[in-house]
Each structure stands twice: as structure tokens, then as C-alpha cells.
Amino acid sequence: MRVGFFLREALRAMRHSAAPSFAALATVLVTMLVLGVFIPIVQATNGAADSVRNRVLVDVYMKTDSTAAQEARVHRELLNVPHVKSVEFESKQAAYAQQSKADPAAYQLLGSNPLPDTFHVIPDNPANVLAVRNALAPPLAGGGTGTLDPAIQSVSNKKNDTRKILEVTNLVTITAAALTVLLALASVLLIANTIRLSLYSRRREVEVMKLVGATDWFIRWPFVIEGTIVGAAGALLAIVVLGITKVALLDPLANHWTLIAAPRTIAFSALVAVLLGAGVLVSALGSGLSLRRFLRV
């Protein structure tokens, strides 16, 4: 394959059809800008949802007169419950110190420590938190709930709140995934349609080449190379705009605003690779596939 010849033909066609080529480049630029902004937003949203889900746990409160031996036994029993990832122990002294620091005026009025020793039970998956809670506080035949061990006073009963948290975070994740798919489809269709309009203005040229005996791939390669160049140029321009915005706006704000600095999103180098690859791939495929209808002469 004569790559140099096809490259020269692609550059010549771009010069002679500057307006359609610029329209395709502008479309790729805008689409990649939207994609470059949308990817970190989706990741930050999913990260926030996962952070909320990972804080869902079950608190097991011990009786105030429980002994160290009983607490050790309960600790072993909790670890044997299905779907339990880990168990963290918080003594009544540590809980009192933390609560009194948060509200010192209220706790100064107390003559003694009313807080119990507590086990924080962390599930292996946030979706299993209700199953863990039901195992720790199984329902009784006569109504109500029991406890896994006689030394346990109670198990945190936040079933409704937990269910709402799981439903909301699942909805956020599903919505973000659906929006990602829709944006990807819209990007492909938008770029492909713009390229198709660009090719339509040169359909006579394709028909003449076809009639004089040129093969389909001989005609197609310059257009594919042209699409690759346009896609790469549009993606690079989008990357430059995003890079300038990141350095001039986001990085200074991240040093002063925790909300901006907190989300862990895709590295900028990886985002550059994604945008460049998407711009080149979609434009090249759009050029090659959109040309098929004009090859039927």
C-alpha cells in the first residue's frame, strides 16, 4: 500500500474541501470537550456514591456489665457471620471521649459514662448489610428480634435508612452508566453524520474515480486517513483546552476547595489517551463506513 500517495491525496482533499473538513474538526473538538468533562464528573459521582455505600455498617452494642471474655467471644462470633468483612471494636471510654469532644457541654452534666462497648461490623459488600443485620438480630417466633449472643444488648436498627441509601446510590450508579452510554452513542452519531455531510459534497469525485476503475479501498484510504487526521486534530485541540482549564482554573481551586480536590478521578494522562484514541477511531471509522453508500455506482 502506497501510504505516501494516500496521505498526499488526503491532505489535498482537505485543502480543496476546507469548509466540510473544518466542520468535521469542530464537531470532533466539541464532542471531545464534552466527553473530557463528562468522564471525570461521572467518576466523581460514582466515587461519592461508593464512599457513602462503604460507610454503611452495623453497630452491635454490648451490655454494660459484659466482661472481656464475653466481648472476645462475641468478636469471634461476629467474624463467623456470613458476608462479614471485618469487625472493629470501640470501647465505651473511646466512644465517650469522642462524643464529649463533639458536644462537651452536654456530656459535662453526666456523672458517669452511659455509652456501651460497641462492635462496628463491616460487610464484604454494602449490598449485604441488611443480610448481616438480620443475622445479628434474627426475628423471634413470637415477634420482635433477638440477638446473636446473650451478651449483646442490641443491634442498630436502621433498616429503612440503609435501604434508602442503597437504593439512592444504586440509582446514581445506574444513571451515570446510562448517561455514559447515551453520550457515547450521541458522540459517534454526531461525528459520523458530520463526516457523512462532508463526504456528500465530494460524491461526484468518488463516482468519477469508481467509473474509471478505481477499487473501493483505493478510494476509501484517503478518506480514512483524512478522518484520522481530522479526529486527531480535533482531539488534540480539545486536550489543549482541557489542559489550560485544568492548570489555570481547577488546580488553583483544588488547593483551596476540598470539594474539588477530594474526588479521585481519571489521571489527565489517561484522559488524554482516551480522548485521542476516541477522536481518531470514531473519525476514521466514520469516514470509512460513511463512504460505502457513495461507492455503489
Image: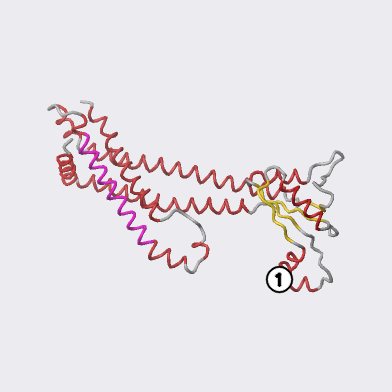
| Percent coordinates x, y for residue 60 in the rendering | 76, 53
The one of 79 and 11 positioned closer to us in this rendering: 79
Considering the whole magenta stretch, tell me its main secondary structure: helix
x then y, percent, for residue 37: 42, 53
Q: Which residue is mark 1?
A: 101
Q: Describe residue 21's horizontal placement relative to residue 92 as left or right.
A: left
Disc 1 element: helix
Residue 97 lies left or right of residue 234; in this view the side is right
User: Is 251 rendered above or below residue 183?
Assistant: below
Q: Is residue 61 left or right of residue 46?
A: right
Q: Quadrant of the C terminus?
A: top left
- How many labels were placed on the picture? 1
- Identify residue type, mark 1: Lys
Residue 67 coordinates in the image, percent (x, y):
83, 58
206 to the left or right of 178: left
Percent across and percent down for residue 284 are 28, 40
Q: Is residue 233 magenta?
A: yes
Farthest front residue in view: 69
The residue depicted at 26 percent of the width and 29 percent of the height is 293
Point out the stretch of residues depicted in magenta. Answer: 220-245
Answer few, some or many: residues within 10 Å of disc 1's Cα (few below 14, many 20 plus, some between 14 and 19).
Answer: few
Q: How is the image coloured?
A: secondary structure
- Between 67 and 105, the one lying in front of the other is 67
Query: In this view, which residue lies farthest toward the left?
Result: 212
Residue placed farthest to the right in the image?
Answer: 142
Quarter of the image with the N terminus is top left
Residue at 43 percent of width and 44 percent of height: 183
Q: Magenta includes 71?
A: no
